[in-house]
Amino acid sequence: MATFLYRVGRLAFRRRWYVALVWAAVLAAVGLGALKAPGAADEGFSMPGIESQKAFDLMEQRFPGTTADGATARVVFVAPHGEKVTAAGNRKAVEDAVAELADGSQVASAVDPFQAKTVSKDGTTAYATVTYKVAADDLTDAGRTQLEKTLDEARDAGLTVDAGGTAVADRGGAGGAAEVIGVAIAAVVLLVTFGSLAAAGLPLLTALIGVGVSMATILALADALGLSTTTGTLAMMLGLAVGIDYALFIVSRYREERAKGRAAQEATSLAVGTAGSAVVFAGLTVVIALAGLSVVGIPMLTKMGLAAAGAVVVAVVIALTLVPALLGFWPNAVLRRKVRRSGPGEAEAKDNGGTRWARFVLRRPLPVLLLGVVGLGALALPMTSLQLGMPGDEAKPTSTTERRAYDALAEGFGPGFNGPLTVVVDAKGDDDAKGAASTIAREIGATKGVVSVSPARFNEAGDTAVFSVVPSTAPTDEKTKDLVTTIRGERPGVESATGATFEVTGTTALNIDISEKVQSALVPYLIVVVGLAIVLLMVVFRSLLVPLKAALGFLLSVLASLGAVVVVFQEGHGAGLLGVETTGPIMSLMPIFLVGIVFGLAMDYEVFLVSRMREAYVHGESAHQAVTSGFRHSARVVVAAALIMIAVFAGFIGESDSMIKMIGFGLAAAVLLDAFVVRMAIVPAVLTLLGDKAWWLPRWLDRALPRVDVEGEGLTRAADTSEPVPLGQEAVRV
C-alpha cells in the first residue's frame, strides 16, 4: 500500500500539470452535465415494510389522484378577544380572504370554513384549507406573495391570521450562512495550525474542488438515478469536512519531511505513501459507515448515505493526487517562514503541546481513564429516557406563522387536532362494505383517547373507505402512541366481526412507525458498521485490542452525545441558551445520523493518531515512547481537524429550525467528546496500561489477515539513506 501510494505521489508531483488539467476537465465536465441535466424532483418520503406506508400505498391505488403532492396551506382565523368569527364583520373578512385566495393562478381550491363547518365549538376559531395545483417547490414568488398579502389584509380587518402547511414552509434549511461561517473558522484554524497562508489555503481549495465535483455529479445523475434534491445535503457537509481533514494530514506530513531535509519531490512522495495510507483507511471506515445506512431500510437515507460515500471517495482521490500536484507547483510556499529562512532541521520540534500532554497521561493513565469513562458515562445516562419522534410545527419558534397557526388550532379544536389519524378500510370482497366501515368507525370511536371520527369517504368502486380519527392528545404525546397501538391491537376482533381489514396511517402514525423501525434497525446497523470497521482496523494496526478499544470509545462518545441532546432538546435544560423554545421527542433519524457520521469522523481521528504510534512502534520505539511520538506528530493535526468539524457543525445551531439545531448540536457535541475525551485522553491511557500487549495479534489471525505496509517501513528506511537537500535546490532532483 505505502509503496504504491509513494509512486502515486511521485507521479502526481512530477506530472503536476497533467493532474491539474485532468481535475479541471473533470470539474468542467460534471459541471456542464449538471447544468444540462433536468432538475430533480423531490421524492416523496417512503419507508417500505411499515403499516403507515402500506395504508398510504393502498390509498394511492384505490383513490387515484387524491394523494397528489400539491402544496397545501391551512389558514387559521381567530376572532378578537371576546368576539366570534361567526359575527357579521368577522365572517365577511374570512369569506373575502378565502375568495381572494381562490383566485390565485396556482390555486386548485380554497374551502370556505363556514361551508365546510371547520369552525370551533366556541366560535372563536376557524380554518380554511387551500390546495395548490403544483408542489411546494414549484410555487412561484407571486403565488407566495398573494398568500401573504391576503393574510395581511385579513389581519387589517381585526382578525388574528396565521397559516401552516407546505405552501408556507421555509424553503431555506441548513446551509448558506452556516457553511460560510464554518469555512471561515476552518481557515482561521488552519492558519493558526500551519502558520502559512498557502498551507492553510491548500486544504480549503482542494476540499472545495472535491465538493464541487461531488455535487455536480449528484446533480448530473439525479434524474437518471432517481435522486431527490435533498440527497446531496449530507454529501456536501461530509465532503467538505473530510476533504479538509485529508489534505491537512498530507500537507502536515509533507512539512514534517521537509523539515528533516528531504527534497520536495521525495517529501511529497513519502507524505502520500505514509499519511496517504492513513487517509485511504480512514476514508474506507467513513464509506463503510455511510454505505451501512442502507441497513435501516429507508430509501431516501440509503441514497443520502451512498451519495455522501461517493463524496468521501472523491475527497480521498483528490488528497492522493491533486494535493501532491499542488505541492509540486509551490513546494516552499506551504512551509513556515522560519523553515524557509533557516533551512531544514530547525523546525522539527522535539517537544510540543502533544508530547507534554502525552507525558501527563503516561504518568497517571488510570486516573485519566477513569475520569474519562465516568464523565462520558454520566453524560450518557439521560439517553436511557430517550423518546424518538418527528417534531413538527409545534417545535418551531413562536415567531413563525406555522407555530402560531399550530397553537391556535390546538386551542380552538384540541391538542389532537394537529395530528389526526387516517384509517383506511379495505372491504374488497365484502358484501356490505358500508356496514363494515361503519362498524369499524364506531368501534374506533369508542376507544378511550379518541375525540371524534369523521364520516367515511368511499372510492368509486365502493370497496375502500377512509376516515379521520382525532386523538385527545398532541401528535408527539406518548399517549397518542399508546392510542395507535391500542387501535391496531383491536384489529383482529373487528376484522373477524366485519370481514373487512383496516390500517392506520397519517403523519402522526407514520412518525410513530418510523421511530419504531429506526430503533429496531439501530442495533443491526451498529453491528454491521462496527464489525466491518474492526476488521479493517485490525488490518491497519495488526492488533486485536486497538480496534476493540476504538469501537468501545466510539460507543461511549455517541451515547454521551445522545445524552446531551436529550438533556437540552427533550428535558429542556439550557434550551433557552440555544434558542430552543419547545422541547419534545428527539428526531427519529437522529441516532442513525449521529452513529453514521460521527463513527466515520471518529475513525478518522483514530487512524490519524494511532497510525503514527504504530509507525513509531514498528520502527523500534517502546510502547510508551510510541505514544509520545504519535502525539508529537499527530496531536496538532487531530485537534485542528476536530476544531474545524466542531465549528462547521456548531454553525447549524444558529438556524431557526429546531431539527437543524438538534443535528448541529448533536454532531458538534459528539466530535468534541470523541476527539478530546476519547482519542486524546482515553486512547493514550489505555495504550499506556496495555503496553506491548496493545499491539498483540494471535498468530492464526496474523496469518489470515492481508498485509499492507501502512507504516511505510520500507519507504522510510530507504528515504533515511538520502542526504538532506537545502531549500531552493529541490529542482535539481525533480
Image: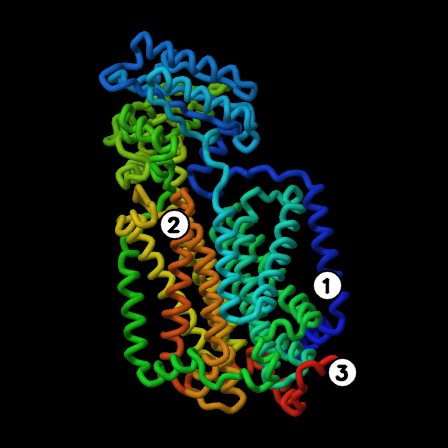
Foreground label between 1 and 3: 3
The residue that disc 3 covers is 732
**Quarter of the figure that contains the N terminus:** bottom right
Labels 2 & 1 near each other (Cβ < 8 A):
no
- Please tell me which of labels 2 and 1 falls first in the chain: 1
Q: Which residue is mark 1?
A: 20
Numbered disc 2: secondary structure = helix
Mark 2 or 1: in front is 1
Q: Is residue 576 visible?
A: yes
Left or right relative to 38: residue 92: left
Neighbourhood count class around disc 2 (C-alpha, 10 Å): few under 14, some 14–19, many 20 upward: many
Which of 418/717 is in front? Answer: 717
Query: Which one is earlier in the sequence, the residue at label 2 or at label 3?
Result: 2
Which of the two discs, 1 and 3, labels the residue nearer the N terminus?
1
Residue 537 vertical placement versus 643 (above, below): below
Nearer mark to the viewer, of 2 and 3: 3
Q: Residue at x 42, y 62 (%)?
A: 671
Q: Amino acid at mark 2?
A: Met
Residue reaching furthest to the top: 88
Compare residues 332 and 586 and report the one nearer the observer. Answer: 332
Residue pictured at 31% horizontal, 57% vertical: 563
Identify residue type, mark 3.
Val
- Relative to 56, does residue 694 appear above or below in the rendering? below
Q: Position of residue 401 (x, y in %)?
A: 38, 30
Give percent across and percent down for residue 122. Answer: 24, 17
Q: Which residue is mark 2?
A: 662
Q: Amino acid at mark 1?
A: Ala
User: Residue at the spot x=39%, y=52% of the render?
Assistant: 520
SS at mark 3 in the image: helix
Residue 159: quadrant of the picture: top left
Residue 348: percent from the left, percent from the top? 53, 84
Q: Position of residue 660 (x, y in %)?
A: 42, 47
